[in-house]
Structure formats: structure tokens, C-alpha cells
């Protein structure tokens, strides 16, 4: 049995970046990789590494679960579950904490960035976050992990920890590989194309949320920061704003940058942005329609119940093996 695994944190509403870098790909990989089982979960334990309101968290967990299906995941070959409902994740995370070095965690760029932004106290869980992520992956011997570019370093650490454990205690874990799409893996903020588009932004105008009103999405795209050159050309260095919009265009329509440049040759940014706004709105309208169906459906509840059982079965077995290999217990 071969497993592909990924997760999304239920901290707020997922963004167009989450969709293009991760959510959208899950369904696509499912179509291509039919002999794999897909383990996709809501990473709620990861969410509490920064303060969360309990009622909002509960709602966001259901939202992310529904959005997985709305964005194209199919129930066949799918184990859909909620991280905290499979208690082995927290236990395996502790094992990974015993394995990882302080220096390795200190090097994580996401941690360094978040610490700079956080005004209140920084929790120790924010620091050990990559150990929990390694636990998520290694518990199921996942072969592939589809994520956006910002998770590359965490994934590399999960690989190192798998190798370290195998060397110390004998072959136990599959060494996972990232599946990072070349295009769309790092969608940028529409107001500041040097930053990634992120749910926890202080300027909502730069971020498109999958569940926001379509009219607002249109406005945000039309107001996206560009340059004064007025030529639709892919040049991430000189023209980061336009390059980002072209990336969004290209991933959704599956047109190459060359094709898009040719289509808008001699036209200004106005036409390009209007067309892009309609393309994005059409895509998100479809997602929202499916989301409204799934979010209150019994189908989703049943899938999550079944997913919890299946995930727990595998996780329990793996954790037992790990404890044995390490000499824990009697
Ligand atoms: P998160 O919301 O941090 O749990 O991220 C969920 C998934 O979306 C991960 O695979 C991220 O790598 C991916 N992701 C987050 N932000 C972006 C972005 N701006 N562009 C592309 N992928 C992203
Ligand atoms: N850390 C990931 C993020 O912030 C979410 C995540 C948690 C994840 N555990 C995972 C992704 C395991 C892939 C595999 O985006």
C-alpha cells in the first residue's frame, strides 16, 4: 500500500494561494496516481501553535474539511480525517521532539518569520511545530507529500528525522518525498508581491479568501499592485506583480506564459486584469457552490468518521512499533 499525505491548518479561511499551491493539486494527483491511497487531514493541532478562538476553530475545521471536497478531492481511495481525533499524532510528535535537535528547529525560516510577526508570547509548540509535522507524515509511511513551496524546509526535516530514526533503531520509516508543483507553489500577496499570500495577513486586500463574496474578489484582482510598464510579460524580478497574476492565470487556465503574453500583446493591464478577475471568480464560484453542499452534508460527517477509524488503525500500529524499537515500556 502506497500513501500520499497532506494537511492544511484550519486557521481562518483558506486562500487562493492554498488552493493553487495545495488543495487543487490533491484532486489532480488522485486522478493521476490511482494506485495510491490519499490521507488528507485537517491540521488542527498545528492551528493551536498560535492563539485560536475555540468556536472559530471548530467552524474552521469543518470548513477546511468541506473545502477539500469542494476543491476536487474524491471519496474513492481517500482517508479524510481530523488530526486531533487520532491521538497518535501528538504522541508521535513527542518522539520526534526527542529526535530533532534544537539547532535544526532554530534554522526553520517559517518559525523565524512568525516570531518576528507575533506580538504576544511565542508558544513552545510554534517552535516544535516541524516535529509534529514530521510525526504526521511518518506515522503513515507516506511516500509523497504534496505541499506548497513554504513547506519545503519542514519536509526536508521530516526526511532527515526518518533517516536518523532508521539509522539508530533499524529500518522503521519510509523516507517521504515532497510533491511541489513548479507553478503556483508560491502565490504572492496582491498588494505586496514580495510576500506570499497568507491567511494571517494584516492587509486583507492582498489576499483572496475562498469563501469571500465574488464581487470582493473581482475588486481585489483589479486593484492588484502592478508596475507602470503596461506590458503583460512574465518577469518575476522586474515585474513581480504581473508575474504573480500571470501565474494565477496560467495555473487555472493551463495556458503557458508564452500563450498569455501573445493573447495580451498590445493590450494594457486593464483587459488582462478584467479577464483574470472573471477566470478566478468562475473557479471560486464553483468551489463555493460545492462547499455549501458539503459543509452541512451527512456525507462529509460519514467520511470523517470513516477516516478517523482508518487513520487510527495505521497510526496505532506504527506508534507501537516505534515504542518497541526505542525500548519504551515493558
Ligand atoms: P497552511 O494554510 O499554512 O496550512 O497551508 C496549507 C497548504 O497551502 C500548504 O501545502 C502550503 O504550502 C500551501 N500554501 C500556503 N500558502 C500558499 C501560497 N501563498 N502559495 C502556494 N501555496 C501555499
Ligand atoms: N505545516 C503545514 C502548513 O502549514 C500543514 C501540515 C501539517 C502538513 N502537517 C502536515 C502538510 C503534513 C503536509 C504534511 O501548511
Image (tube, rainbow, N blue to C red):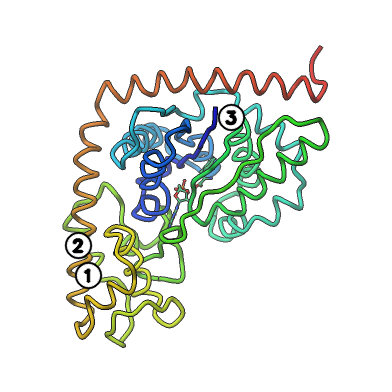
Q: Residues within 10 Å of mark 2 (few under 14, many from 20)?
A: many
Query: Which residue corresponds to mark 1?
Result: 222
Q: Secondary structure at mark 3?
A: loop
Q: CA distance from mark 1 to mark 3?
A: 43 Å
Residue drawn at (30%, 87%) of the image: 228
Query: Which residue corresponds to mark 3?
Result: 140
Residue 89 position in % (x across, y down): 59, 29
Residue 120 position in % (x across, y down): 55, 51
Query: Which residue corresponds to mark 2?
Result: 218
In the rendered image, the vertical position of residue 195 relative to residue 294, given as above or below: below
Q: Secondary structure at mark 2?
A: helix
Say which label, 1 or 3, has the lower sequence index.
3
Q: Which residue occupies the extreme top position in the image?
A: 330
Q: Nearer the viewer, residue 303 or 251?
A: 251
Residue 45 shown left or right of residue 66 in the figure: right
Residue drawn at (61%, 49%) of the image: 154
Residue 155 position in % (x across, y down): 61, 48
Q: CA distance from mark 2 to mark 1?
A: 6 Å
Amino acid at each position: 500500500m502506497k500513501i500520499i499525505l497532506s494537511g492544511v491548518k484550519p486557521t481562518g479561511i483558506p486562500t487562493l494561494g492554498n488552493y493553487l499551491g495545495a488543495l487543487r493539486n490533491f484532486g489532480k494527483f488522485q486522478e493521476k496516481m490511482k494506485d495510491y491511497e490519499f490521507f488528507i487531514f485537517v491540521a488542527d493541532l498545528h492551528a493551536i501553535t498560535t492563539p485560536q478562538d475555540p468556536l472559530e476553530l471548530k467552524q474552521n475545521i469543518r470548513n477546511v474539511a468541506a473545502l477539500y471536497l469542494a476543491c476536487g478531492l474524491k471519496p474513492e481511495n481517500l482517508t479524510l480525517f481530523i488530526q486531533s481525533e487520532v491521538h497518535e499524532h501528538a504522541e508521535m510528535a513527542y518522539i520526534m521532539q526527542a529526535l530533532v535537535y534544537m539547532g535544526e528547529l532554530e534554522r526553520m525560516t517559517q518559525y523565524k518569520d512568525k516570531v518576528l510577526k507575533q506580538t504576544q508570547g511565542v508558544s513552545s509548540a510554534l517552535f516544535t511545530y516541524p516535529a509534529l509535522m514530521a510525526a504526521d507524515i511518518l506515522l503513515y509511511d507516506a511516500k509523497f507529500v504534496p505541499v506548497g513551496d513554504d513547506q519545503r524546509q519542514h519536509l526536508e526535516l521530516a526526511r532527515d528525522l526518518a533517516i536518523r530514526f532508521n539509522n539508530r533503531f533499524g529500518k522503521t520509516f519510509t523516507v517521504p518525498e515532497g510533491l511541489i508543483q513548479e507553478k503556483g507553489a508560491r502565490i504572492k500577496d496582491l498588494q505586496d508581491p514580495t510576500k506570499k499570500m497568507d491567511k494571517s495577513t494584516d492587509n486583507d486586500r492582498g489576499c483572496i479568501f475562498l469563501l469571500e463574496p465574488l464581487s470582493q474578489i473581482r475588486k481585489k484582482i483589479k486593484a492588484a499592485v502592478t508596475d507602470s510598464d503596461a506590458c503583460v510579460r512574465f518577469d518575476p524580478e522586474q515585474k513581480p506583480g504581473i508575474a504573480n497574476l500571470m501565474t494565477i492565470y496560467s495555473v487555472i487556465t493551463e495556458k503557458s506564459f508564452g500563450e498569455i503574453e501573445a493573447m495580451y500583446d498590445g493590450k494594457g493591464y486593464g483587459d488582462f486584469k478584467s479577464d483574470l478577475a472573471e477566470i478566478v471568480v468562475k473557479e471560486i464560484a464553483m468551489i463555493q457552490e460545492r462547499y455549501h453542499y458539503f459543509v452541512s452534508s451527512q456525507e462529509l460527517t460519514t467520511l470523517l468518521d470513516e477516516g478517523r477509524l482508518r487513520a487510527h488503525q495505521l497510526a496505532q500500529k506504527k506508534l507501537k512499533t516505534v515504542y518497541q524499537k526505542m525500548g519504551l515500556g515493558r
